Amino acid sequence: MDRRQQSRVFVDLPVQIYGMDAYSRPFTQAASLRSISGRGATLQCVDAQLKPGDVVDLLYQGSKAQFRIVWCGKPGTEMAGEVGLESLSTGVTLWDVDPMRCAASVGKG
């Protein structure tokens, strides 16, 4: 059963993430958004050592917002390098894709 409370949209958008890693060292790196929803996102291609509860900044096309790490894919699995994010920035719209509108239009083609 899916525990998500909001619809998500699969995307492939380049972003920069930065913050402090699990060892309290500053990092910055390029990553890619894999999916987005109204309150969060999933990143892929993340090399930084992060853990749930960490806060990172995400930069997309000149706009920045803060996110909390909710989950991290386990090394050695097909989800390695993926990170689930929850938005901490209210009223900030980073991407030009509206997940709610996309979800509503599915099947109306």
Image (cartoon, rainbow, N blue to C red):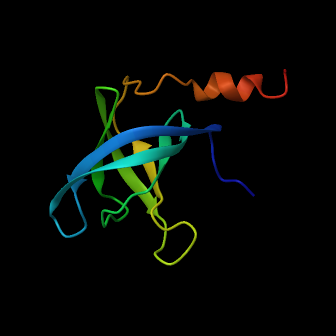
Residue under the image location 43 percent in, 56 percent down? 45
Q: Quadrant of residue 6?
A: top right
Residue lying farthest left? 25
Q: Position of residue 25 (x, y in %)?
A: 15, 63
Residue under the image location 49 percent in, 37 percent down? 39
Residue under the image location 38 percent in, 62 percent down? 52
Quadrant of the image containing the N terminus: bottom right
Q: Quadrant of residue 69?
A: bottom left
Residue lying farthest bottom? 76
Residue under the image location 36 percent in, 24 percent down? 92
Is 52 located above or below residue 108 in the figure?
below
38 vs 55, left or right, is right
Q: Position of residue 20 (x, y in %)?
A: 20, 57
Q: Position of residue 41 (x, y in %)?
A: 49, 43
Q: Position of residue 109 (x, y in %)?
A: 84, 21
Is 82 located above or below residue 77 in the figure?
above
What count of labels does the image hold? 0
92 vs 107, left or right, is left
